[in-house]
Amino acid sequence: MKYRKKPVVIEAVQWNGTMASTKKVIEFMGDKIHDDFITQEKFYDHCNIVEKTGIQIKTLEGIMTASINDFIIKGVNGEFYPCKPDIFEKTYEIVKGEDINE
């Protein structure tokens, strides 16, 4: 059998490794970034580590690491997970009237 993915509108931000982008991801995800790695209070102290090694995210499957240029997706149940840019581009499109870089 073949199956088609149901059309679902998701929220996502792309992380490009900059301080501004990292702050945007932290604001988007709230407390779902792995506590041992980075918190909003420790953001500026850990920026160099984040840019070199990625952002660790609490997902339903455990801790996953988002690399530079990955998208961080908020799933239908409020869960977060990283997605590689090529997979994101093949799977999602911008909802009319919305800007992905807002």
Image: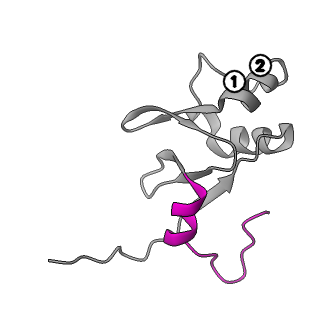
Q: Is residue 2 magenta?
A: no
Query: Residue lying furthest bottom in this view?
Result: 96
**Left or right of 66, for residue 23:** right
Q: Amino acid at mark 1?
A: Thr
Magenta segment's dominant SS is loop
Residue 26: tell me if it is visible. Answer: yes
**Left or right of 57, for residue 49:** right
Q: Is residue 86 magenta?
A: yes
The Cα–Cα distance between marks 2 and 1, rounded to whole angstroms, is 5 Å
Q: Against 33, is 86 above or below? A: below
Residue 38 percent location from the top left of the image:
68, 23
- The region drawn magenta spans 84-102
How packed mark 1 is, by other alpha carbons closer than 10 Å (few <14, some 14-19, many 20 or more), is: some
Which residue is under mark 1?
39
Which residue is under mark 2?
42
Residue drawn 69% across the image and 50% down it: 69
Quarter of the C terminus within the rendering = bottom right
Asked if the residues shown at circle 2 and circle 1 are in contact, with their CB atoms under 8 angstroms apart, the answer is yes
Q: Amino acid at mark 2?
A: Lys
Residue drawn 85% across the image and 23% down it: 44
Element marked by disc 2: loop
Residue drawn 77% across the image and 19% down it: 42
- Give me the disc on residue 91: none
Residue 95 percent location from the top left of the image:
63, 78
Element marked by disc 1: loop
Residue 93 percent location from the top left of the image:
59, 75
Residue 25 percent location from the top left of the image:
70, 43
Residue drawn 73% across the image and 28% down it: 52
Quarter of the N terminus within the rendering = bottom left
Residue 43: tell me if it is visible. Answer: no
**Left or right of 15, for residue 61:** left
